[in-house]
Image: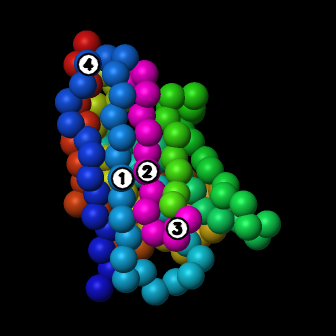
Amino acid sequence: QVQLVESGGGSVQAGGSLRLSCAASGYPYSKYCMGWFRQVPGKAREGVASIYTGYTGLARTSYADSVKGRFTISQDNAKTTVALQMNSLKPEDTATYYCAINRVTTDRCLWMFASGAFDYRGQGTQVTVSS
C-alpha cells in the first residue's frame, strides 16, 4: 500500500517560514519524482516544486516561478522523504499543499503534478499566511 504522509504546515505571518515534510512508503518503482502542488478552492492546481534523481545521479529540481528564490525542495539520502522549506511567505501562498509522486523522471514532473497526472498524493496540509 502506497502512503504519502505529510507533516508541517500551519499559520504564519507574511515574511515568515514553514517547513513541510512528506514520507513515502510502498511505492513500487525505484525511479520516481516527488514534489508538491497546492490548491485553493475555486482556483487551478499549481505545481510548486519537484525533485527527482537524473541519469547523472544528481538531484534535479523544478519550481513554480511564483516560489523561485523563496522555496527549497530537498530529499533525504534514501530518497523516500522530501521536504519543502518555505521562506518569505506571502499571503498568496495560502493554500492546501499536497505531496505527490509519479514515475516521470523528467522536468515535466512539475507540470504533471499541476495537471493532476500523479500516481499518488498525500492527504494535504494547510498553509495559511496572514498579512
Magenta stretch holds residue 83: yes
Q: Secondary structure at mark 2?
A: strand
Disc 2 marks which amino acid?
Ala
The percent coordinates of residue 17 (x first, y second) are 36, 28
The percent coordinates of residue 29 (x first, y second) are 52, 83
Disc 4 marks which amino acid?
Gln
Q: On the rendered structure, is 55 left or right of 116?
A: right
Above or below for 81 versus 17: below
Q: Which residue is mark 1?
A: 21
Mark 3 is surrounded, within 10 Å at the Cα level, by few (under 14), some (14 to 19) or many (20 or more) other residues, namely some
Above or below for 78 versus 128: below
In magenta, the rendered stretch is 77-90
Image quadrant holding the C terminus, namely top left
* Residue under the image location 20 percent in, 30 percent down: 11
The label number, if any, that marks residue 90 in the structure image: none
Q: Secondary structure at mark 1?
A: strand
User: From mark 1 to mark 2, how far is it between C-alphas?
Assistant: 4 Å
Disc 3 marks which amino acid?
Lys
Marks 1 and 2 close (CB-CB < 8 Å) = yes
Q: Which residue is mark 3?
A: 79
The answer to whether residue 74 is seen in the rendering is: yes
* Residue under the image location 34 percent in, 22 percent down: 16
Disc 1 marks which amino acid?
Ser
Mark 4 is surrounded, within 10 Å at the Cα level, by few (under 14), some (14 to 19) or many (20 or more) other residues, namely some
User: From mark 1 to mark 3, how far is it between C-alphas?
Assistant: 12 Å
